[in-house]
Amino acid sequence: MAQKELIVGGGCFWCTEAVFELLRGVSDVESGYANGDVPNPDYRMICGGDTGYAEVIRITYDDEIIDLDTLFDVFFATHNPTTLNRQGADEGTQYRSCICYEDEGTLKAAKRAIERAQADYNDPIVTTLEPLRNYYPAEDYHQDYYRQNPMQGYCNAVIPPKIVKLIEKFSDKVT
């Protein structure tokens, strides 16, 4: 079993976390903050929109069960990568669509994934490809947020359509 990690941002981390937790081969999904300019950020700081951080998830996966290309395909299918610094009603640089890579192999795979995904969108994909500079886990109350708060209104409006897309396109990858 070869455990690997991938860090992506696709808007609100509660919503991306809920999708990736359903994939076979994914052992952990942690909400966090990446690529900002201040040490030890917290949610309140991030919401100010001027720290440079993106809300992201860190996906730990077994690459013998699920590969990087599939993770990227799920990522692009379950958020809108064509809206700059915005996902739905969430607006600001902290909600940018981004892939934070740690090596050239991940960067090359991300570029290929963007090329594949572009065929599904009329507008250009604006997902940023960023070398990972830093990462901080989000506060405990953000972890497994949808599982712990299934009746939260925002989550109920945003997450179920993402899960429907996941099941429609990747049913063989869902646990």
Image (cartoon, rainbow, N blue to C red):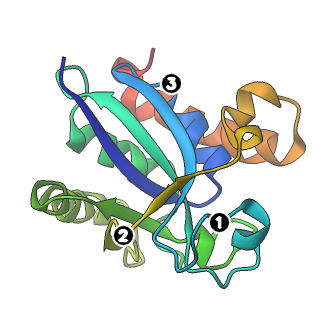
Q: Residue at x 71, y 39 (%)?
A: 140
Circle 1/circle 2 CB separation < 8 Å:
no
Residue designated by label 1: 41
**For the N terminus, which image quadrant?**
top left
Q: Residue at x 66, y 85 (%)?
A: 50
Front position in the image: 16 or 137: 137
Q: Earlier in the sequence, mark 2 or mark 3?
A: 3
Name the kind of residue labelled 2 in the image.
Arg
SS class of the residue under badge 1?
loop
Name the kind of residue labelled 1 in the image.
Pro
Disc number at residue 133?
2
Residue designated by label 3: 22
Tell me the mark number nearer the camera, choosing from 2 and 3. Answer: 2
Q: Residue at x 39, y 26 (%)?
A: 26
Q: CA distance from mark 1 to mark 2?
A: 14 Å
The picture places residue 95, in percent across and down from the top left corner, at: 60, 68
Front position in the image: 173 or 17: 17
Q: Residues within 10 Å of mark 2 (few under 14, many from 20)?
A: few
Q: Earlier in the sequence, mark 3 or mark 1?
A: 3
Circle 2/circle 3 CB separation < 8 Å:
no
Q: Residues within 10 Å of mark 3 (few under 14, many from 20)?
A: some
